[in-house]
Image (cartoon, rainbow, N blue to C red):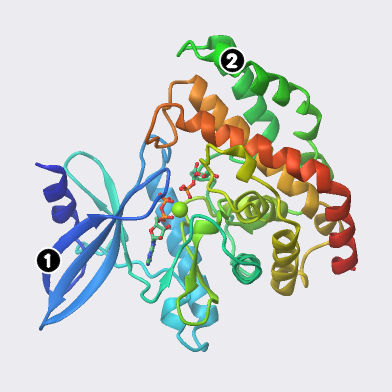
C-alpha cells in the first residue's frame, strides 16, 4: 500500500463520521509521524490529528496509550467547567473497535485526536508573553495531574531524564564510533567532559516524584490565536513519573533563545534573560503553590542540566549514525548539539543572576 493510502486507511479506522477528503504530513516533531486529516460531513469540514507512534522508540505502545487515556480523562474532568473546555485538553477519538488506538497490518500503532482549531505551536519563541503563557500552561498541567489517582503511570521510556546514564551512553558511543565521526567532534567531547559533575545533581537532591510531562518543548503547547493563552499542552507520550525541574529545564532550553534548535549561525543562540524571567513568573503562577523549596532552588540549574542532557543526546545520535531523532540534512544532529552547548555557555554567563531572580520570585 502506498504511504498516503496506508495513512488514509488508518484514518478510516477511527470513529469519525463523514467522508475522508485529504491528509497532509503535519508539524515538526522529531519522533512520531503526524498527519492532519480532513473529513467532510453534510458539507461541513472537520479535521483531526492522526499519529503513527514511533515503535523504535516507544517499545510499549499499549502502556503508553493507557497513560494518555488516564491523563486526558483526568484533565478533562478538571477543566470541565471552564470556558472552551473542549480545547483545553487533547481528546482521543476511539477506534471503531472501541480501543483508543488502531494497529494496522504491519503492526504500526495509530491514534487520533480532535484537531484543536484557532491555536498553533511555534518552533521559536517570539515574545516574553508567549514564554509566560507556555510556562503557565505547563505548570498548570503538573498542578492538575498532582491529583491523578493511583496506580503510578507506566514509564514509557525508562530513565528518560537520567542524565548520568545519558552521559554513559555518550561515552559508549564515542568508544564504539560506529559511524566514524568521533574525530569530527573533538571540541564537543572536551566540552562535555568538563561538565560531567553536573549530571548527578537533580537525582541526588531527594526531590519528590511527581507526574511530569518530560518533553516541555515550546512547540508542545498550543497558544490560542486570539488571546495568546497557552490553551493546551500536547505531545503526551512521555508523561510519566518524574521530577518537576525536568519540565522547567526543558522550557529554559527551548524558550529562552530566539534561534531554532538546529540554527547553524551560533551567534544567534543566546539565553535571553527577559524570557527566563517570563518563564519563572509563568511557571510559579500555577506551580508555585505546590513546589517545595528544594524544587524551587533547582529551577535555574535545571535549564543548564536539561540543555546539557539534550546536547549529549543529539551528539550520541550523531555518533551512532542518526538512528533516533529524525534528521533532514547531513550533520543535523551535530548542529542541534552545537546550539545546546552554545546555550549552555550563555546560561553559564548569567547563572548567578538567574539564581537571584528565582530566589526573589519564589520566596
Ligand atoms: P511529536 O511527538 O512528533 O513532536 P506532536 O504530538 O508534538 O508530535 O505533534 C506534532 C505537531 O502537531 C505539534 O507541534 C502541533 O503543531 C500539532 N498538533 C498535535 N496535536 C494537535 C491537536 N490535537 N490539534 C492541533 N494541532 C496539533
Ligand atoms: C523529541 O517529539 P518531540 O520532537 O517533541 C524528544 C525529546 C527531545 C526533543 C528535542 C520521546 O521531542 O525528548 O527533547 O525531541 N522526544 C523523545 O527537540 O525522545
Ligand atoms: Mg512535539
Q: Quadrant of the N terminus?
A: top left
Q: Quadrant of the C terminus?
A: bottom right
Q: From the viewer's perspective, is residue 331 above or below residue 305?
A: above
* Residue 121, image x, y percentages: 46, 63
Q: In which quarter of the image is ligand 1?
A: bottom left
Q: Which residue is drawn at 12% across and 66% down?
A: 20
Mark yes or no: residue 159 visible: no
Q: What element carries label 1?
A: strand
Residue 296: which numbered mark, if any?
none
Mark yes or no: residue 158 visible: yes
- The residue that disc 2 covers is 174
- The residue that disc 1 covers is 21
**Residue nearest the observer in this picture, 20 or 93:** 20
Q: From the viewer's perspective, is residue 296 above or below residue 335?
A: below
Please tell me how crowded label 1 is: few (under 14), some (14-19), or many (20+) other residues with Cα within 10 Å: few
Q: What element carries label 2?
A: helix
* Residue 58, image x, y percentages: 42, 41
* Residue 339, image x, y percentages: 60, 38
**Residue nearest the observer in this picture, 273 or 216:** 273
Q: Using residue 51 as the reference point, say whether residue 170 is left or right of it.
A: right
Q: From the viewer's perspective, is residue 118 above or below residue 362?
A: below
**Residue nearest the observer in this picture, 352 or 7:** 352
Q: Which residue is drawn at 68% across and 35% down?
A: 163
Amino acid at each position: 500500500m502506498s504511504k498516503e493510502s496506508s495513512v488514509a486507511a488508518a484514518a478510516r479506522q477511527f470513529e469519525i463520521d463523514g467522508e475522508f477528503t485529504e491528509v497532509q504530513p503535519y508539524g515538526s516533531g522529531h519522533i512520531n509521524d503526524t498527519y492532519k486529516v480532513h473529513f467532510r460531513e453534510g458539507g461541513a469540514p472537520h479535521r483531526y490529528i492522526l499519529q503513527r507512534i514511533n515503535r523504535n522508540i516507544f517499545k510499549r505502545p499499549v502502556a503508553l496509550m493507557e497513560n494518555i487515556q488516564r491523563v486526558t480523562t483526568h484533565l478533562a474532568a478538571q477543566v470541565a467547567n471552564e470556558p472552551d473546555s473542549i480545547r483545553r485538553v487533547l481528546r482521543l477519538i476511539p477506534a471503531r473497535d472501541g480501543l483508543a488506538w488502531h494497529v494496522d497490518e504491519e503492526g504500526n500503532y495509530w491514534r487520533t485526536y480532535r484537531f484543536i482549531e484557532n491555536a498553533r505551536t511555534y518552533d521559536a519563541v517570539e515574545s516574553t508573553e508567549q514564554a509566560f503563557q507556555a510556562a503557565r500552561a505547563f505548570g498548570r498541567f503538573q498542578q492538575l495531574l498532582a491529583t491523578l489517582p493511583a496506580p503510578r503511570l507506566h514509564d514509557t521510556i525508562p530513565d528518560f531524564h537520567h542524565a548520568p546514564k545519558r552521559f554513559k551512553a555518550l561515552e559508549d558511543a564515542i568508544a564504539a564510533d560506529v559511524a566514524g565521526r568521533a574525530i569530527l567532534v573533538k571540541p564537543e567531547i572536551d566540552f562535555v567532559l568538563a561538565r560531567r559533575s553536573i549530571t548527578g545533581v537533580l537525582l541526588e537532591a531527594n526531590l519528590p516524584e511527581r507526574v511530569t510531562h518530560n518533553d516541555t518543548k515550546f512547540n508542545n503547547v498550543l497558544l490560542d490565536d486570539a488571546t495568546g493563552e497557552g490553551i493546551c499542552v500536547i505531545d503526551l507520550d512521555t508523561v510519566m513519573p518524574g521530577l518537576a525541574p525536568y519540565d522547567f529545564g526543558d522550557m529554559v532550553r527551548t524558550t529562552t533563545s530566539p534561534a531554532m534548535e538546529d540554527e547553524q549561525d551560533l551567534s544567534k543562540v543566546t539565553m535571553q534573560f527577559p524570557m527566563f524571567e517570563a518563564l519563572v513568573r509563568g511557571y510559579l503562577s500555577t506551580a508555585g503553590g505546590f513546589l517545595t523549596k528544594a524544587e524551587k532552588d533547582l529551577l535555574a540549574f535545571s535549564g543548564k542540566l536539561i540543555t546539557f542532557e539534550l546536547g549529549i543526546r543529539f551528539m550520541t545520535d550523531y555518533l551512532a549514525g542518526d538512528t533516533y531523532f529524525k534528521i533532514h540534512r547531513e550533520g543535523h544532529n551535530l548542529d542541534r548539539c552545537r546550539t545546546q552547548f552554545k546555550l549552555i555557555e550563555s546560561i553559564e554567563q548569567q547563572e548567578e543572576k538567574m539564581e537571584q531572580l528565582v530566589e526573589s520570585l519564589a520566596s
